[in-house]
Image: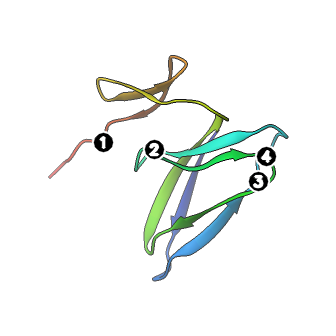
Amino acid sequence: PTYLYYNPYDTVQTVCFVPAEKSQVDLYDTLTHEYLVRNIDEEGCFDILANSSRLLVVLPSGSEIENKDGTYMVDNKIVAYKQLNIR
């Protein structure tokens, strides 16, 4: 699953995520290409900067992202793409 979180406030906000299933998961932000929380099974919290957003993909715990020419993959499934700089 993929979730978009947006913080419209002028201050950092903390969000807590509860997985739908009772298995350990990792939260990966496809905008920053970083793991926010790993090995959560009940609740994992993360910050969203002021006036910013996070696009999270829920991955099985321990998943490793592989970058193949700008395509980010887990077990040969596309998770994200390299962002283009458009002017």
Q: Which residue in the rendered view is the most extreme toward the right? A: 22
Q: Which residue in the rendered view is the most extreme toward the left? A: 87
Q: Is residue 30 above or below residue 9?
A: above
Question: In this rendering, would 76 be left or right of 68?
Answer: right
Tell me the quarter of the image containing the N terminus: top right
Where residue 49 appears, as percent x and y from the top left, is 46, 70
| Mark 2, residue position | 30
Evaluate if marks 4 and 2 touch, with contact meaning CB atoms under 8 Å apart.
no
Q: Nearer the viewer, mark 3 or mark 1?
A: 3
Residue 18, numbered circle: 3
Q: Amino acid at mark 2?
A: Thr
| Mark 1, residue position | 83
Residue nearest the viewer, comparing 34 with 56: 34
Q: Amino acid at mark 3?
A: Val
Q: Amino acid at mark 1?
A: Gln
Residue 67, numbered circle: none
Query: SS class of the residue under badge 4?
Result: loop
Evaluate if marks 1 and 2 touch, with contact meaning CB atoms under 8 Å apart.
no
Where residue 29 appears, as percent x and y from the top left, is 49, 48
Q: Amino acid at mark 4?
A: Asp
Query: SS class of the residue under badge 2?
Result: loop
Give the mark nearer the N terminus: 4 vs 2.
2
Q: Nearer the viewer, mark 4 or mark 2?
A: 4
Q: Measure how far apart labels 2 and 3 are at the Cα level.
A: 19 Å
Residue 41, numbered circle: 4
Q: Nearer the viewer, mark 1 or mark 4?
A: 4
Q: How is the image coloured?
A: rainbow
Give the mark nearer the N terminus: 1 vs 2.
2
Where residue 35 appears, as percent x and y from the top left, is 52, 46
